[in-house]
Amino acid sequence: MKNQLYPLILFAVGLFSCELDNYDAPTASMSGRFVDAQTGGLVEQDLINGTVIQLAEHGYDPVGLQYLAVKNDGTFENKLLFENTYTVQPVRGNFYPLDEQEVKITSGTTLDFEVTPYLRIINPQISYSNGKVTATFSIGQTGAANVRKIGLFAHPNPVVGQPVQVYSVEEDLNRDVTEDEVFTLEIDVINNSSIFGKYNDFFFRIGAIANAAESKYNYVTAERITL
Amino acid sequence: MNYYKMILSYWISIVFLSIFGCSESPEPDPVQKPVPTDPPPTEITYDEEGLLYTGIDGLVMAGYQGWFAAEGDESNRGWYHYRAGCGFQPGCSTIDMWPDVSEYPKTYPTDFKFQNGETARLFSSYDAETTDLHFKWMQEYGIDGVYLQRFVAEVRDSNPAGKRHFDKVLENALASAKKYGRAVCIMYDLSGAESEEVRNFVEKDFFELVSRYKLFDNSENPTYLRENGKPLLAVWGVGFNDNRKYTIDDVSVLVNKLKGTRNRVSVMLGVPYWWRSMGNDTENNPQLHEVIKNADVLMPWAVGRYSSDNYASVSSQTLVSDLQWCKSNEVKYMPLVFPGFSWGNMNEGAEYNAIPRLKGDFFWQQVNGAVKSGAESLYIAMFDEIDEGTSIFKVLHEGSTPVNGDGKFIGIEPELPSDHYLYLTGEAGKWLKGGTGFNSSQPVRQ
């Protein structure tokens, strides 16, 4: 008799257990850009392990934090948010820290962050000849943080960067630089044919990372090169 | 019939209501009488003719303690700020650095001796000759001027000896500033103040000084610092989370009183280093930001917040972001630079040279960071602070200081001239004023 009751109990539990989850689907969204306060250009990022936007939804105790990833080009978008007021703060970025702010997020909310990137890549040039990809560039320091390292990263996908690459060259600097100084980094494609022979096209991206707390690479847009 | 009665009473009601419904409303006054009000207060404008310093941009100024007294000087305060609780003799003092007094016209013998048995001498801040020499150095090395410290605890009514001392130093400093064309600005240090003193005493004391020394008189004091078209007054010590006896609200009241209804002065606030994020040394109270927004200049206290080793990491979280915040809120931001830190004699068990000077590299590291972050003025801590070993004025070299019982005095590195930090401060000023040839390496003296 008892055994006959179990299916009924399970059925009842199953029937009512979903009742609490019957919330409306998320209807709010937030999109925006990370903009260089001085140049007005987008601040390029890493998609993986790059800047994230920390959201704390109001009305909960304790507050569970949510994180939005930022795209490589410095834009972001999330369409699966619940309409509410949030405390919003970009964290672990490649720019000088921003303070948190309260934002009422509804359908189609846009929010641009004006930031000062730790470093600016100036006059980037990437060329391919004689089996070598050569990048030249200068760096602008925007504050006290000097340059820890520079890098040139390669990957078949345009999201290339320090965390997403099949080949890279990096050089430690750990010093101040001036905008007159020209840096050159080179990738030998011929001697690394086991990597570069797999695809016709590769994306190459110049980056530089500052000596700052939780600093991330600053970049320019990746350049596609047919090898 | 009842139906006709009802219709009739309805219309009668309408007529009565039309006639009397509004009868209790007063007749509208055909002429609007203006309500008598005071004219809105107009903001004070000051004539700036003849003034040498009408804004802080491009200025490098140091904090000036002026609190040292000597046994035998006219202050009658004994070895004030030199002596420890046990007195002032070998093994017993508060100072970590010994001033190079070779250029002082007036000095006083101490119980300290050099290795060769010679008596070590010291200056008194109370003497006009001392102040004169200090301002002469400022002119010689291109240091724009000083913020004259005025501790509430030193000048309160119950401390007449302290008030006499600080008034005398102020009087001497005003004369020397005029003589050498150096900027001066009074800075109230609220440390040790009571709530009531912050709310009432500071404003009263300051405007007494304004009146007595004609601080705002262009010909009497042509170098008293101005900002935003007004004389500048600095107030140090708001927002620290070290259990002070006054609150941020008390300082808010003070700032409003100082400015008055006609915005008669500009105010600079000395705040803790982590003021923006309200962590670490800062009270977690959003009212702090409201008080700051009501001020004109902000100077966060950086002494002890980093050393050369972690300067890059720490300052990357503050300088640029602080500057952005201040720019958004129309407050000027003045970073602090200090040469090093040592208070081994003042605090038993404390480390000597706790923040090493590294022959000036640490000082220049901060100058470089501040300038590259966009700072337009600097606060140097301090001109004459030898209790905490932050002084930039001339002190004796390591190994050439008097003997100090079981303890010691630290000195400037033997490879450096004793005026090295005065020189570096002057060079920082040149860089801020647009001078070229400066970079992250400290300048090489010709």
Image (spheres, coloured by chain):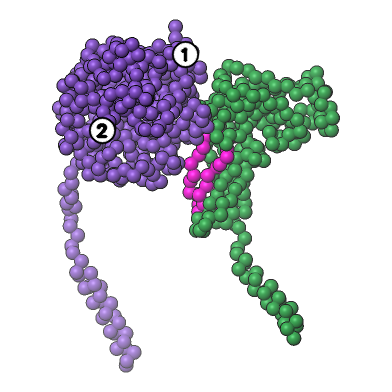
Note the chain letter of the green one.
A
The residue at the point 61 percent across, 38 percent down is: A74
**How packed is label 1: few (under 14 Cα within 10 Å), some, or many (20 or more)?**
some
The residue at the point 49 percent across, 33 percent down is: B314
* Region of the chain picked out in magenta, as a range: A84-109
Tag 2 secondary structure: strand
> What's under tag 1, amino acid-wise?
Pro
Q: Position of residue B213 (x, y in %)?
A: 17, 25
Q: Colour of chain B?
A: purple
Labels 1 and 2: the sequence-earlier one: 2
Q: Position of residue B48 (x, y in %)?
A: 25, 22
Name the mark nearer the viewer: 1 or 2.
2
On whether disc 1 and disc 2 are found on a single subunit, the reply is: yes
Q: Quadrant of the N terminus of chain A?
A: bottom right
For residue A172, what is the image quadrant?
Answer: top right
Left or right for B242, reference A175: left
Camera-side residue: B190 or B357?
B357
Disc 1: host chain: B
> What's under tag 2, amino acid-wise?
Phe
As drawn, the label of residue B443 is 1
How many numbered markers are drawn?
2
Q: Quadrant of the C terminus of chain A?
A: top right
The residue at the point 28 percent across, 24 percent down is: B89
Disc 2: host chain: B
